[in-house]
Amino acid sequence: MRLNDFNLSTIDLHPALTLYWEQADRNLPVCDLQTRDHNLFLITGKGRPLTLDQFRTRTQQVAPNVGLFVQATPPTRLYGYRLVPHQILFG
């Protein structure tokens, strides 16, 4: 998924939705973002999850055609997301 695709598909969603990466046994909060190698990496951790509004604010200066990845070993390309109450789950 590209940043532009994500932004267009979430334009009508509530800005307070929090972002998580969905794994088989748990959901990890997306706490930070990092750009490198013409890609945008979502960093998961134990901190407070970013909201959709915070994500949009922090990616305003990022090229819209960058690919979305989760920082993992190896990095995982994101192909979509799903909505659950109060959350966006990347998968």
Image (cartoon, grey):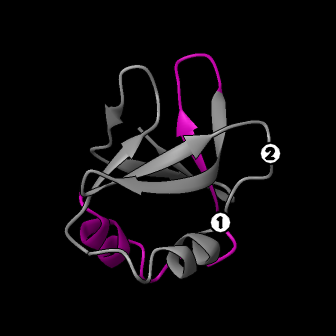
Q: Nearer the viewer, residue 5 or 86?
A: 5
Q: Is residue 74 above or below residue 22?
A: above
User: Residue 10: percent from the left, percent from the top?
Assistant: 42, 73
Quarter of the image with the C terminus in it: top left
Residue under the point 69% across and 59% down: 86
Q: Nearer the viewer, residue 63 or 51?
A: 63
User: Residue 80: percent from the left, percent from the top?
Assistant: 32, 48
Q: Identify the residue position indicated by label 2 in the image.
A: 47
**Within the magenta stretch, is there residue 28?**
no
Q: Is residue 79 above or below residue 72?
A: below
User: Residue 69: percent from the left, percent from the top?
Assistant: 36, 44
Residue under the point 65% across and 35% down: 28
Quarter location, residue 73 = top left
Q: Is residue 73 above or below residue 27?
A: above
- The stretch in magenta equals 1-26
Residue under the point 31% across and 78% down: 8
Q: Identify the residue position indicated by label 1 in the image.
A: 17
- Callout 1 crowding tier (Cα within 10 Å): few <14, some 14–19, many ≥20: some
Amino acid type for the residue under numbered disc 2: Gly
Q: Residue at the top extreme?
A: 25
**Within the magenta stretch, is there residue 16?**
yes
Mark 1 and mark 2 residues within 8 Å of each other at the beta carbon: no
Quarter location, residue 14 = bottom right
Residue under the point 42% across and 82% down: 11
User: Residue 42: percent from the left, percent from the top?
Assistant: 49, 48
Q: Nearer the viewer, residue 8 or 66?
A: 66
Q: CA distance from mark 1 to mark 2?
A: 16 Å
Amino acid type for the residue under numbered disc 1: Leu
- Callout 2 crowding tier (Cα within 10 Å): few <14, some 14–19, many ≥20: few
State which tag comes first along the sequence, 1 or 2.
Answer: 1
Q: Residue at the right extreme?
A: 47
Secondary structure at numbered mark 2: loop
